[in-house]
Image (cartoon, rainbow, N blue to C red):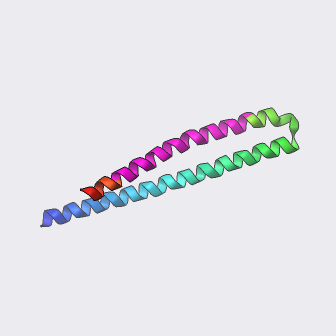
Amino acid sequence: MVIRGNHMKSREIEKNCLDLEYRKQLQIMNALVILATTGMISFTGTFIWKRELLLIGSFLTFGILMACLLVYQRVNRRLKEIIDSIRSLKEV
């Protein structure tokens, strides 16, 4: 019975660690959305106020958005892995 109790505690600890990792990944995803939004606002500002900087602003915005998209996909994949891990803990 003691072994089963320790096993339950270790599963709970593992689930709590996965929950914390999930929250961390969500925070990263939120930061990426904010960064992408800021990039688009910057592009719009460049286009409106400095037409001669439009090309530079376009490249910078495109670079920021591509970097955000790549990291977003990685974070999203990790979130799915964490959810699968939590589900497998509940099944055992």
Quarter occupied by residue 11:
bottom left
79 sits to left or right of 32: left
Q: Residue at x 70, y 45 (%)?
A: 39
What is the chief secondary structure element of the magenta stretch? helix
Q: Residue at x 75, y 36 (%)?
A: 58
65 sits to left or right of 86: right
42 sits to left or right of 12: right
Residue 48 percent location from the top left of the image: 86, 44
Q: Quadrant of the N terminus?
A: bottom left
Residue 71 belongs to the span the image colors magenta: yes
41 sits to left or right of 35: right
Asked if 83 appears above or below 2 in the picture, the reply is above
Residue 61 belongs to the span the image colors magenta: yes
Residue 82 percent location from the top left of the image: 39, 51
Residue 14 percent location from the top left of the image: 31, 57
Residue 36 percent location from the top left of the image: 66, 46
Q: Quadrant of the C terminus?
A: bottom left
Q: Residue at x 81, y 42 (%)?
A: 46
What's the magenta region?
59-85
Q: Residue at x 46, y 44 (%)?
A: 77
Disc count in the image? Answer: 0
